[in-house]
C-alpha cells in the first residue's frame, strides 16, 4: 500500500520532536508537512539540531494544510488551540489525532470547570474517541477524531484498569501518587522549569485541582458503574523523561499476591505495549519506548494493593501513543514504527 501522508501541526515542542523521531522510520508513513507559526521558514533541524541532515524539512504555517493531500493530521498544540483547528477542519478528508486535552473529557461543561475556559467547538465531543488503545481499540479503529490521552492518565489508568474491570477494589478509595519529568511541562520556559528550581529539588503541585484528575475518573467510570473517586497528586522530578505512578487501592474481599498477578497478566496478555513485570519498574526501564511497565503487589499487613506503572511521558504518554492510534485508524500492524528498545542507561 502507499505510505500514509502525515501532517504534524505544531512540531517545535518536545512532543512534535518525538513524533518526527518515531515517524521518520515508520515503514508505512511519510511526513508530508510540519508546521509552526512562530518558526515558519526555518528548517525543522534548525529548531531540533539532533535531526540535522536527517529531517531538514522547512516549517510551514498551518494554512498550508489546505495545499496538501493528507491522510492524517496529528496536532501537537496546547489545549485551547487545538479546538480551533478541529472546528475549522472537522469536515476535511483527513483524520485527526489531537494530543491536547481539548476533547478528552465528556462535554464542554466539564472542560470549562477543569480547564477554566469556554470550549468553542462542543460538537467535537460527540465524535471524539479517547485514544487509549488497551481499552478502546475497537472504537479507535472506526474513529476520525482521536483524543490522545494525557501522560499521567495513561500511566494511572493502565495501572488501575485490571482491578476495576474485575471489581476487585473499593472504587471510592483510590490514591495515585505520581511523579513526572520536567518535559511534561512542555518546551516553553517558565519560573517553575528554571534549572535552579528543578535541579536538586522535588515537589508536589496541582493538589486537589490537577485537570488530569477528572480525565482519569471519567475514563475509569466507563469501567465501573459506581464511579471511581481518585485522590491524584502529581510531583515534579528533576529528570528529563518519565512518569512513575504509585497507586494504592483497597480490595473488596480477601485476595493474594498470586491472584493480583493473574488479573494483570490476563488483562494485558494481548496488549503489545504493556509489560507486566516481576518486580517494580523504574522510568529508565521504559525510557524512549512506547512501553508501559506495570507491577502489582498485595500488602497483607495494610490490606492494600500497591501498583506501580512506568512510562516515558513523551512516547507512551504522547507521541508513541498517537502513532499507535494512527496505526489502528488505518488498519496497519499496531506495532508498526514502534519497536523501539528502551534506552538504559
Image (tube, rainbow, N blue to C red):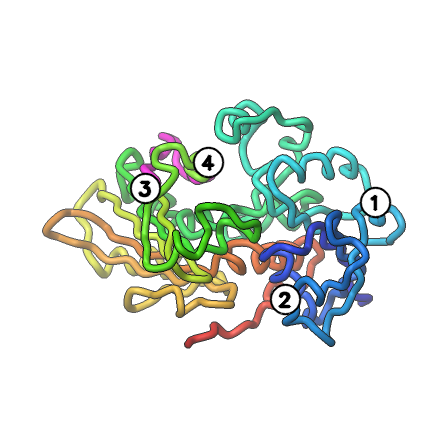
Q: Which portion, as a residue range, is magenta? A: 215-233
Residue 336 found in image quarter? bottom right
Q: CA distance from mark 1 to mark 2?
A: 25 Å
Residue 292 found in image quarter? bottom left
Check disc 2: other Cα within 10 Å, few if <14, some if 14-19, many if 20+. Answer: some
The nearer-to-camera label among 1 and 4 is 1
Q: Identify the residue position indicated by label 4 in the image.
A: 211
Q: Identify the residue position indicated by label 1 in the image.
A: 63
Q: CA distance from mark 3 to mark 1?
A: 49 Å
Q: CA distance from mark 2 to mark 4?
A: 28 Å
Q: Identify the residue position indicated by label 3 in the image.
A: 167
Q: CA distance from mark 3 to mark 4?
A: 25 Å
The nearer-to-camera label among 3 and 4 is 4
Q: Identify the residue position indicated by label 2 in the image.
A: 22
Q: CA distance from mark 1 to mark 4?
A: 31 Å
> What residue is shown at x 54% (from left), y 34% (from top)?
105
Amino acid at each position: 500500500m502507499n505510505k500514509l501522508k502525515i501532517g504534524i501541526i505544531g512540531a517545535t515542542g518536545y512532543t512534535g520532536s518525538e513524533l518526527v523521531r518515531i515517524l521518520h522510520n515508520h515503514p508505512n508513513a511519510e511526513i508530508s508537512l510540519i508546521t509552526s507559526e512562530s518558526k515558519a521558514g526555518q528548517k525543522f533541524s534548525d529548531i531540533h539540531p539532533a535531526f540535522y541532515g536527517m529531517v531538514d524539512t522547512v516549517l510551514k504555517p498551518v494554512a498550508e494544510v489546505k495545499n496538501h493531500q493528507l491522510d492524517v493530521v496529528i496536532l501537537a498544540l496546547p489545549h485551547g488551540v487545538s479546538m480551533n483547528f478541529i472546528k475549522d477542519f472537522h469536515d476535511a478528508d483527513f483524520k485527526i489525532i489531537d494530543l491536547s486535552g481539548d476533547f478528552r473529557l465528556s462535554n464542554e461543561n466539564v472542560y470549562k470547570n477543569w480547564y477554566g475556559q469556554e470550549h468553542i467547538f462542543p460538537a467535537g465531543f460527540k465524535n471524539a474517541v479517547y485514544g487509549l488503545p488497551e481499552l478502546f481499540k475497537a472504537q479507535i479503529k472506526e474513529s476520525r477524531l482521536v483524543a490522545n490521552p494525557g501522560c499521567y492518565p495513561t500511566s494511572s489508568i493502565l495501572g488501575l484498569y485490571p482491578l476495576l474491570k474485575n471489581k476487585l477494589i473499593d472504587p471510592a478509595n483510590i490514591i495515585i501518587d505520581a511523579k513526572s519529568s520536567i518535559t511534561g511541562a512542555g518546551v516553553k520556559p517558565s519560573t517553575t522549569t528554571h534549572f535552579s528550581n528543578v535541579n536538586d529539588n522535588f515537589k508536589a503541585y496541582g493538589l486537589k485541582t490537577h485537570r488530569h484528575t477528572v480525565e482519569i475518573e471519567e475514563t475509569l467510570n466507563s469501567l465501573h458503574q459506581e464511579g471511581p473517586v481518585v485522590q491524584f497528586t502529581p510531583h515534579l522530578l528533576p529528570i528529563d523523561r518519565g512518569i512513575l505512578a504509585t497507586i494504592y487501592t483497597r480490595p473488596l474481599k480477601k485476595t493474594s499476591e498470586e491472584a493480583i498477578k493473574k488479573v494483570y497478566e490476563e488483562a494485558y496478555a494481548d496488549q503489545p505495549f504493556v509489560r507486566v513485570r516481576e518486580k517494580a519498574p523504574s522510568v529508565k526501564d521504559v525510557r524512549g519506548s512506547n512501553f508501559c511497565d506495570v507491577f502489582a503487589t498485595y500488602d497483607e499487613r495494610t490490606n492494600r494493593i500497591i501498583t506501580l506503572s512506568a512510562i516515558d511521558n513523551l512516547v507512551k504518554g504522547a507521541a508513541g501513543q498517537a502513532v499507535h492510534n494512527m496505526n489502528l485508524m488505518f488498519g496497519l500492524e499496531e506495532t508498526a514504527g514502534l519497536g523501539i528498545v528502551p534506552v538504559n542507561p
